[in-house]
Image: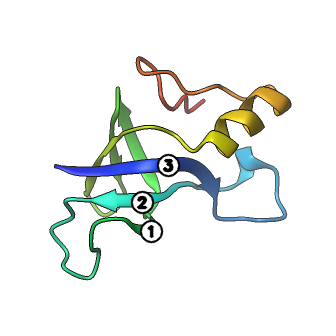
Amino acid sequence: MITLENWSVITDHLYAAPELGLLLLNGQCYNHDDLRHYDGKWISTSYIREVNGNAITTSNGTVYHLGKPADEYVAWCKKTGAHVPTEEVPIKIT
């Protein structure tokens, strides 16, 4: 089971409104089957295709299980009024 820790949701368009871009995850991966992704390596995933609790499926079919979000991401969510990650609903895609 691939796990992402210290994760955040990012967009593929740095200078566009978040709702206009595709969403990806950024974080430290653990237990990845691709040997290039050693434990603790920071990665950005392909686009988020499906959210099922803390299991996130990306456009290439990889399933990531979310651990703890990055503290900076949680603070940014609170400051901007974005969805604040919880264990029950880590990501809310509208």
| Amino acid type of the residue that numbered disc 3 sits on in the rendered structure | Asn
**60 left or right of 34 in image:** right
Q: Residue at 72% across / 44% down in the picture? A: 19
Residue 10 or 72: which is nearer the viewer?
A: 72
Which numbered mark, 1 or 3, is in the foreground of this view?
3
- Residue 57 position, x and y percent, is 32, 47
SS at badge 1: strand
The residue carrying mark 2 is 28
Alpha carbon distance from label 1 to label 3:
11 Å
Q: Residue at 21% across / 64% down in the picture? A: 32
The residue carrying mark 3 is 6
- Residue 59 position, x and y percent, is 37, 58
Quarter of the rendering occupied by the C terminus: top right
Compared to residue 38, the image places residue 58 above or below, namely above
- Residue 43 position, x and y percent, is 45, 68
The residue carrying mark 1 is 43
Q: Which numbered disc flags the more N-terminal residue, 1 or 3? A: 3
Compared to residue 51, the image places residue 23 above or below, namely below
| Amino acid type of the residue that numbered disc 2 sits on in the rendered structure | Gln
Q: Residue at 66% across / 26% down in the picture? A: 83
Alpha carbon distance from label 3 to label 2:
6 Å
SS at badge 2: strand
Q: Which numbered disc flags the more N-terminal residue, 3 or 2? A: 3
**9 left or right of 68 in image:** right
